[in-house]
Amino acid sequence: MGELQRRLSMTERSVFRLETLPSYAAAGEANLLRDFHAGRPLPPRRPETDPWLRMVADSVQAGRCWSRVHVLDRPLSDYLRFELLGYQGNLTAGEDVRIADRATVPKALGALRQDFWLLDDELAVIIEYNEEGRRLAMEPTSDVVSLIEQRNLAMMHSIPLLDYLPTVQNELRRSW
């Protein structure tokens, strides 16, 4: 993530993330995910305790807009249950986290399967994953027109995380 973090820290106006997978296999989450599956309490994610969230919070405080949409399917995968609860740390850092349920969004949005970061509407980082959700590659591109359209579609047809959570409360393992 070093190069991506460097690029993110250089943004001047906005950062957007589109997520489309039912699970991700990030090495840094392995222990937390194991604890979640075992029913152990997870440490709260806050800018004071998480370097990523500190970076987001500092960026938001400097006037940059951070947002993300996760396009997902129901029923929720175990990973999505974990992630939806973890996103609350992102909210604390000032990120606008939104959810788009494929069952209720336009076909064009539901068909999206390519994750990316969009920085200042000028540069994108396309992320490739394998079947298990392990990141294979990140490719920067300045060809962002279609990605801006995807972002706009995703933002238009998604709802804020805090509005979405009550609709899936029965699928979540822990209270929030």
Image: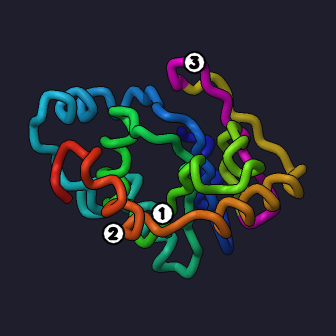
Image location of residue 102, percent across then percent down: 59, 47
Q: Residue at x 55, y 67 (%)?
A: 66
Residue topped by disc 3: 131
- In magenta stretch: residue 41: no
15 or 170, which is in the foreground? 170
Mark 2 or 3: the one toward you? 3
Q: If the image is split into quadrants, where does the N terminus sit?
A: top right
Q: Amino acid at mark 1?
A: Val
Which SS class for mark 1? strand
- Disc 1 marks which residue? 97
**Circle 2 sits on which residue?**
92
Q: Residue at x 46, y 79 (%)?
A: 61
In which quadrant of the rendered view does residue 122 lie? bottom right
Horizontal side, residue 170 vs residue 77: left or right: left
Dot 2 or dot 1, earlier in sequence? 2
Question: Label 2 sits on what residue type?
Answer: Thr
Q: Residues within 10 Å of mark 2 (few under 14, many from 20)?
A: some
